[in-house]
Amino acid sequence: MSAELAECARGTRVASEAEIARRFGVGRAAARAAVQELERRFVVRRTQGSGTFVNRRIDYVISRSAPPSWSATIAAAGLPHEVAGAEFARRRVGERAAWVIARHVPAKRYLVATDPAYHALLSPVSVASLKVQGGPMDEREVAEFAAHPLAADAVALRRWDDAAKDPDGPRLTMPTLLAAHARCVAARRV
């Protein structure tokens, strides 16, 4: 999607969520989240009753080829990593996990705004991406984020993700993680 938008002039109408979902082989929720993220970044603007339009040209393209894996295909479609991760989780472990994963970037923005020591823990790449992602949340955004019942889970996941960025740390395969999730779900039903 980013490749297409990079070629579009300001004011060009963006495909509908249904068309985006069909074109990239993702669910409507992933397509909607991608458009919302583009709107949050001011790349597109929505006009009630008229559609979504390119607000400004972007000067980067994530990929012009479609890699073979499902998650890489979503990334190539221009979806932010947290949207791709949320869609992956939604299909495999459920909506609650998908919501938490989709808030990966907002959780970082929240932590930078509310925890003075957190910013120092970020890698240079994460600091640079923070600027593109909107920087620290303002007071209104902090209050809105914190009010959500799953906000603490999103913050915890963000902290776990940051702690897991150890190249010498243990690595778990996706089948191992999904099996562990299935055991947890089964244990809750007992």
Image (spheres, rainbow, N blue to C red):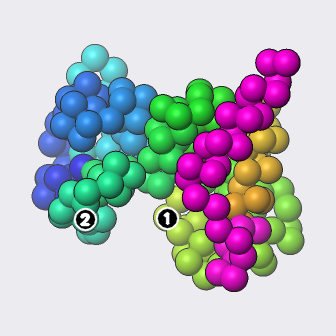
As drawn, 126 above or below 157: below
Q: Which residue is mark 2?
A: 63
Residue at 57% x, 42% y: name it: 102
Check if residue 165 falls in the magenta segment: yes
Q: Which residue is mark 1?
A: 132
Magenta span: predominant SS is helix
**Looking at the image, is mark 2 or mark 1 nearer the viewer?**
2
Looking at the picture, tell me which residue is in the foreground, 168 or 48.
Answer: 168
Horizontal placement of 162 versus 38: left or right? Answer: right
Horizontal placement of 46 versus 41: left or right? Answer: left
Checking the image for residue 188, the label placed there is none
Helix, strand or loop at label 2? It is loop
- Disc nearer the start of the sequence (2/1): 2
**Image quadrant for the C terminus?**
top right
Is the residue marked by circle 2 packed among few (<14), some (14-19), or many (20+) residues within 10 Å?
some
Q: Is residue 3 visible?
A: yes
Residue at 86% x, 71% y: name it: 117
Question: x, y percentage for residue 47?
Answer: 31, 27
Residue at 65% x, 42% y: name it: 179
Q: Is residue 2 visible?
A: no
Horizontal placement of 100 versus 121: left or right? Answer: left
Residue range in magenta is 163-190
